[in-house]
Image: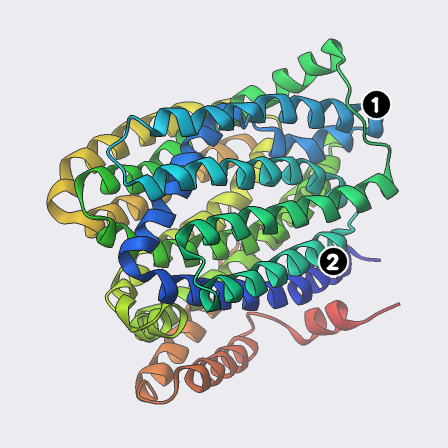
Amino acid sequence: MSLTRTIAHNTIIQIIGKGTGLIFSVFTLGIITRYLGPTQFGYYTTAFAFLQIFGILIDFGLQMITTQLISDPNEDESIMLSNIFTLRLLSALIFFIAPVIAIFFPYPNAVKIGIGITSLTYLFTVLSTILVGLFQKHLLMGKVALADFLSKFIFFLLALCAMYFNWGIIGIFIVSAFGSAVYFAIVYFYGRKITKITFAVNFDKWKIIFSRSWPIALSIALNLIYFKADTIILSLNKSQHDVGLYGAPYKILETLIGLSYLFLGLLLPLLTNSYAQKKYEHFRAIIQQGFDVMVIVSVPIIFGTYIQGNKIMALVAGKDYIVSGDILKILVIASGAIFVSAVFGYAIVAMNKQKLMIKFYLINAVISLIAYFIFIPTYSYWAAAWITVCSELFIMCFAFFILYKNTNFFPRLKVFFAVLGSSVIMAMALYIIKDMNIIISLGLGTMVYGISLYTFGGISRKTIIEITKIK
């Protein structure tokens, strides 16, 4: 099976599973935002942001290097995976310190209790991310998509129960943790069918893991500092109502990012193998494919959101969040930058050059934090959103700089310009039908975009046949 079809078929399986799961995620978000209202949804957002800051301390970059290490032909898959899993489990115990520290923050009791419950959510989540690397290596992401779908479906049903029986915000925190537990149980079950997973402590393996992971860990830590510190600083300077209005579109941003990383996770083993075998032309071809796909997906989302952002937020979260549509129009620009920079970042990891990015993450984190502290107290979520955009554009530019310096890769822009032209046409169509039902207008807009993209040569008939052909 060709590279295009290998990636495409696995991606299609994921899209079906993740797409269905995404529908339930959106429905669940709509239930929670409507049930809690902006203020209590602010509580919910603050608790999760607080735990993500603690996640910085335990990440160690293990998620990104798992696929790389177990794909190494010189390593035993089971032994290496078991050591990574054990290391992640031990480090994840730090999450349980978070509820103690939260006591000293000026948060309502509901937030402090929520942080305690959410510690379990994150424990199951970080353990699951390690196992996902196994499925990425074997191109069996359909199992992950199934786990994602089932966990989100269960979360959706329990959220409905929480609303119907009025379990309150604490009930929402509990059902969220249960959904994460279901996801972990499923990926662990299927993971055990692929390879043996045990608790293992081999300090020689840990040394290899740390030598590979620490640059990524530091980069991720600096990345998360500026990516989530905005919510924490907002929660300490503004009302929980403001946090809720900012948190709703941010959830959509995180969903988009999660979908992009499903595709990128499939690229990493291919990038790693190509570079290790010194197939540099093939390596650059994979990067180009990743770049093209991310552009095809992200650019129309940016244009479409600019036209219909307020209606999208009203549809997803409820009329209390219409103002969040204007925030979403800003944050979606950041999603585009994240999509593209992630392709460059994964290529850098495949080359084992991630150390070169650390100084740029450090500069970005320092500048962003200073900007958050200066501007959020005055400009609230508007400052948080625009600083996030600037931060992600900064990282995208320097990730490209590092990649170009080490590989001479410069993306061919034929697809980009075709996408840009198609997105403009789509945006014009959406503007003309902006008063139409939002679901119908988005469907028509997608059709216009697809036809325009094909017409402009952004995607060829040969590529469509290659992707859909099954043998």
x, y (%) of residue 321? 28, 66
Q: Which amino acid does label 1 sit on?
A: Asn
Report the quarter where the C terminus lies: bottom right
According to the image, label 2 marks what residue? 10
**Disc number placed over residue 47 in the picture, else none:** none
To which quarter of the image does residue 148 belong? bottom right
x, y (%) of residue 157? 58, 65
x, y (%) of residue 68? 70, 32
According to the image, label 1 marks what residue? 74
Residue at 57% x, 49% y: name it: 261
Which tag, 1 or 2, sits closer to the chain's start?
A: 2
436 or 128, nearer to the observer: 128
Q: In this view, does 389 lie to the left or right of 55?
A: left
Query: SS of the residue at dot 1?
Result: loop
The furthest residue to the left: 378
Task: Mark 1: give few (<14), some (14-19) or many (20+) Cα within 10 Å.
Answer: few
Viewer can see residue 415? no
x, y (%) of residue 251? 42, 55
Query: SS of the residue at dot 2?
Result: helix
